[in-house]
Amino acid sequence: MATLPVRRAIAAVPALILILLVGACAPNGVDTDVDPEAEAAIQVNNDLIPSTVVTVWIIPDVGSRQMLGTVSPGDSETLRFDAGATTREYRLRARTTAGAEIVSTPFSLAAGQAVEWNLNSNMVTPL
């Protein structure tokens, strides 16, 4: 007959197997419901006061920044870029004609997804 510590170890085996199976099936950052060729979209609302044109870049957590385009004063523009299928973390940076910069908080985005960035409040929200 097995001793008490051996019985406990044997009883823990099914729980350990379940933990390993769940971990193996966990998402790996690739969204299988999204077309990896679809572009990600950033809707930029240039509601800055005083009004000014801004140039917008996207900055991935790894890699180089990419210029997305410009947004005129009081306008909203949807800027698109190739995000790939893997969800990554990004920041947005806008530079005014006077040289002032606005940098967003980090957010996650993948192909086919979209966010909205209101410059005056510097809020990024999913769409």
Image (spheres, rainbow, N blue to C red):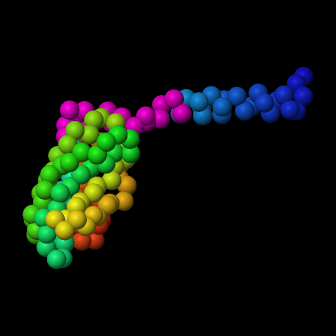
Which residue appears at 12% of the width and 60% of the height? 71
Please identify the quarter of the rendering in which residue 124 is found: bottom left
- Nearest the viewer among 78 and 29 is 78
Which residue appears at 32% of the width and 60% of the height? 104
Which quadrant does the C terminus fall into?
A: bottom left
Q: Can residue 109 be seen at all in this image of the molecule?
A: no
Which residue appears at 14% of the width and 52% of the height? 69
- The image position of residue 29, as x and y in percent, is 40, 37
On whether residue 29 falls in the magenta region, the answer is yes
Q: Can residue 102 be seen at all in this image of the molecule?
A: yes
Which residue is most to the top? 1
- Nearest the viewer among 86 and 22 is 86
- The image position of residue 119, as x and y in percent, is 23, 66
Please identify the quarter of the rendering in which residue 36 is found: top left
Which quadrant does the N terminus fall into?
A: top right
Which residue appears at 31% of the width and 48% of the height? 59
- The image position of residue 109, as x and y in percent, is 31, 46
Which residue is most to the bottom? 50
119 vs 17, left or right, is left
On whether residue 58 falls in the magenta region, the answer is no
- Nearest the viewer among 94 and 105 is 94
When the figure is inspected, residue 124 is found, relative to residue 50, above or below; the finding is: above
When the figure is inspected, residue 11 is found, relative to residue 61, above or below; the finding is: above
Q: What secondary structure prevails in the magenta region?
A: loop
Which residue is most to the front? 98
Residues drawn in magenta: 23-39
